[in-house]
Structures are given as structure tokens and as C-alpha cells.
Image (cartoon, grey):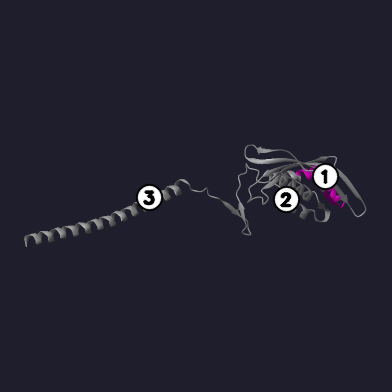
Amino acid sequence: MKTGRNYGEVEHVQRRYETWMKSHERMSRTLLVMVLVTALLLVSFLVVLYHKPEPVYFATRVDGGVLPLVPLSTPFLTDGQVTNFAVEAVTHAMTIDFANWRNDMVSASRYFEKPDGWNNFLDAMETSGMLSYIRDHRLVSTVVASGAVITSSGLSEGKNYTWEVQIPLVITYESASEISRDSLLAELVVKRLPTWEAPDAVGVSRIVVRPGKGI
């Protein structure tokens, strides 16, 4: 009987040991899973902390359209886009109808940096006498441009990127009874501007028109 009791005690101890081992294995697996999850969370946190993407800022137009904010020290436009803009600006600005010259001038103002570029253009028109000539002689002026060339480009005073553009022009003055033409050379400084200020991201900051060979 004593031996049977010993066997029973041994079996009881063995069962308790097996139960403890199973519990230990479950706890070990649970602990391992927790360690792995914690390590994964830590790695994810470090990635987010040290690899945060640069914020991207946008401006919006009145109509809700999005305008990217680009540093003024970068070109943003290609040389071809700049020459196209310069040609469009000078032809639009110098195409004037005596009957609607105020509206024509207001329409052309969008191509210029404000206030300096626009005031420079107005002064040039008054100094040259072109505007008064059109008004006094009841003329309509139209401009044809070709061969726009960028003569230099780079940072202006270390802030804004600028281009200097030369454009040969032929301007035609037409009245009810006569037509006359002049050959001119326009020299423009096109300046990078904030997209929220100028939809084209550039504007004319200075324009000089002098006699030239034309087309």
C-alpha cells in the first residue's frame, strides 16, 4: 500500500510538472509575440520620427484651383515657356485701339510685376509718346514678333530668378485712311513671381523698346 501511495504521489507531481511546462510554453510564446509586436511598433515609430516627408504647401485661386508654391530662386518655367510669355506680353501690351485704350491697358497689366514693372511700362509708353500718338491720331496698333532670344538668366539680387529677353517687332499703325509700320526691338526683363500673385509664375519687371531691324 505504501508503494502504491508513492506511485500516486509521483504521478501527481509529474502531472503538475507537465501542466507547469505547458503553461510556461504558452507564456513564453505569448511573451515572444509581445516582444515582436513591441519591436515592430518601435521600428515603425522610429521610421515615422526620422523619415517624415517634407510638407507640401499650396496656394489656391479664387476659383478653388490649386497653385504650387515654388521657390522664387528657381526657374519653374522652361526657356521656351519664358520666351512665349515674353512674346505674348509685349504683343498684347502694344496692341492698342484708340477707342478702347484704357481697357486694353488694363488687360495688358496682368503680364507685369506690380507695381514696379507696370509703372515702368506706363512711363515708357508716355515717354516714347506712343500712347498719345495712338490716341491723338485715332489709330489701332498691332504687333508682330519673332525670334525671341534669352540673352541672360540667373538670380537677381540673390532672390528672384530673372531672364533678359530680346524680341524683334514690327508694329503697324492703322487709321481709317492710312497704314504705317515701324521696326522695333523690345528688351524685357522677365522675373519669377509667386504663383499666388502671378498665375504664370512670372511677370515683366522692365521693358525697353528701341528702333530695330524688325522681322
Horizontal placement of 170 versus 107: left or right?
right
Q: Which residues are magenta?
A: 123-143
Q: Secondary structure at mark 3?
A: helix
Indicate the position of residue 98 as horizontal and vertical percent values.
83, 53
As rendered, which of 166 and 131 lies closer to the eye?
166
Q: Nearer the viewer, mark 3 or mark 1?
A: 3
Could you tell whether 167 is left or right of 31 in the image? Answer: right
Q: Measured from the top left, where is residue 100 in percent x and y?
A: 80, 56
Identify the residue at horizontal 72%, vertical 49% (top origin): 111
Residue that mark 1 sits on: 169
Q: Residue at x 82, y 49 (%)?
A: 143
Q: Given the current orientation, which residue lies at the most extreme left position?
A: 1
Task: Pick whichever of labels 3 and 1 is earlier in the sequence.
Answer: 3
Identify the mark at residue 146; answer none if there is no mark. none
In screen coordinates, is 88 left or right of 20? right
Q: CA distance from mark 3 to mark 1?
A: 71 Å
Mark drawn on residue 109: 2
